[in-house]
Image (spheres, helix red, strand yellow):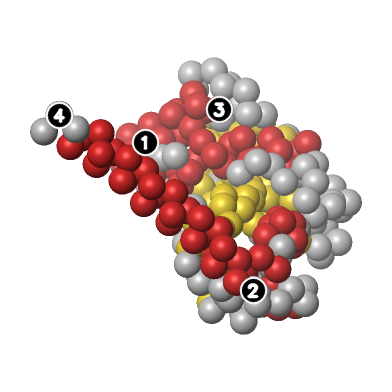
Amino acid sequence: MKYVKPIVRILLSITLLVVFILACIYMPKQRCERISAEVHTQNESVTVSPADVERIIADAKIDVIGKALKEIDLGEITDKLKANPYIAEVNFIHFAGKKLVIDYTLREIMMHVFTPNGGHYFVDSEGEVVPFTAKMKDYLMIVNGNVPDSFTAGKKAPKKVQDALVLTKKINQNDFYEAMFRQIYLGGNGIELTSAIGGQTIVFGTTENADEKLKNLKTVYENGLSHKGYNTYAQLDARYRNRIIATRK
C-alpha cells in the first residue's frame, strides 16, 4: 500500500503532461467560432456594448471568426479597443476553447459640459474629456457658464471644469444633494448651483469647505425653507462659514 500514493501521483503528473502537450499541439489549429465580450460600467447607459466591440474589431479589418487561434493577434485587438474614447480598460482578452473572451470596463461619465460657443462634451470620473455620444442617457450633472471653449478628447478638462467635478463627486455621494443640485454654473462668483426645488441661485464660490457648505444648505432647505416656503428666496449665498445668506425675491 505504501507504493500506491507515489504511483498515483506519477500517473496524475503524466496525465497532466499529456493533456498539456495535446493542448499545445491541437489548440493552435482550432478556429475561433465566436466572440464573447463582457462589459463593466458605473453608468446606467452602455456607451460601448458587446455588439459594438465586435463592430470595432470588424471595422479594423481584423479577422477573428473562422481564423486559426494562433493567427489571431490579441495585442492588435487590445490596442484597437483601448483607442476607443469610451473604454477605460481592457481587463483581459484570451481564448476559452474556440471562443475569444474579452472583458472590458467603460469610463464613468459624470458631467455634461456646455461651452459658450455651442460645443459640448462629457467629463469622466478621472477628469478627462470624453466625446458626446447619444448613447449616454444618464441624468448627468450639467455644467455651463464661463467654460473654456478649447478642449481635447482624451485630455484633462480645463481647471474650472475640474473644480466642478470635485463638487459633482461630493453631490453624487448623497441622495439629498443629488436630487437637489443638478446644474453647475461657472460665473464671476465662482461656482453657482441651481436648486431643483424653488429654483434659487446658490452662490457656492470655490470648492474649499465644500462639505460644510453642502451641509449648511441641506439644513436651510430642511429646517428653514420647508417652513417658510421654497419660493421665498431668490438667492442663497453659501460662501461664508457656518451661515447661509438669503436674498428675498
Q: Is residue 148 left or right of residue 236?
A: right
Please tell me which of labels 2 and 3 falls first in the chain.
Answer: 2
Q: At label 1, which amino acid type do we have? A: Gly
Viewer-proximal residue, 22 or 247?
Answer: 22
Residue at 71% over, 63% down:
73
Distance from Cα at disc 1 to Cα at disc 3: 20 Å
Q: Is residue 67 left or right of residue 182?
A: right
**Are the two marked residues, 4 and 1, in contact with CB atoms closer than 8 angstroms?**
no
Distance from Cα at disc 4 to Cα at disc 1: 84 Å
Assign a secondary structure to mark 2: loop
Q: Which residue is mark 1?
A: 224
Please tell me which of labels 1 and 3 falls first in the chain.
Answer: 3
Distance from Cα at disc 4 to Cα at disc 2: 47 Å
Residue at 56% over, 73% down:
30
Q: Which residue is mark 2?
A: 68
Please tell me which of labels 4 and 2 falls first in the chain.
Answer: 4
